Image: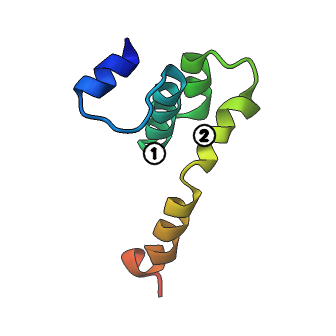
């Protein structure tokens, strides 16, 4: 059913339930979700499983950190 809906939506990449779950978790972290709350929502028994989503945006976080001194004018 999900593949049919993706096709109707014009998506060319493969879409499957775990991809939606991973995308939701990654976006939640990007928007400031707390890891313990995300752990509860995802039903993870182990926090280390949930914390893997924190590393999904490492490159983006490094890019933001690189410009922070200029943004904050800490010189």
Asked if residue 42 is positioned above or below residue 54 in the image, the reply reads above
Quadrant hosting residue 62:
bottom right
Query: In this view of the protein, which residue sits in the foreground, 32 or 11?
Result: 11
Name the spot of residue 69 as percent of width and height, x first.
47, 79
Helix, strand or loop at label 2? It is helix
Name the spot of residue 16 as percent of width and height, x first.
48, 24
Query: In this view of the protein, which residue sits in the foreground, 25 or 71?
Result: 25
Badge 2, how many Cα within 10 Å: few under 14, some, many 20+? many
Q: Residue at x 32, y 26 (%)?
A: 6
Badge 1, how many Cα within 10 Å: few under 14, some, many 20+? some
Most extreme residue toward the top, as rendered?
1
Q: Quadrant of the N terminus?
A: top left
Return the residue at label 2.
Answer: 53
Q: In screen coordinates, is 11 left or right of 33?
A: left
Q: Which mark is residue 30?
A: 1
Q: Residue at x 23, y 24 (%)?
A: 8
Helix, strand or loop at label 1? It is helix
């Amino acid at each position: 059913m999900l593949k049919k809906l993706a096709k109707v939506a014009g998506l060319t990449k493969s879409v499957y339930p775990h991809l939606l779950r991973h995308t939701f978790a990654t976006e939640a972290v990007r928007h400031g979700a707390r890891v313990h709350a995300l752990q509860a929502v995802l039903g993870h028994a182990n926090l280390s499983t949930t914390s893997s989503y924190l590393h999904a945006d490492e490159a983006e976080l490094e890019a933001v950190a690189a410009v922070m001194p200029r943004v904050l004018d800490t010189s």
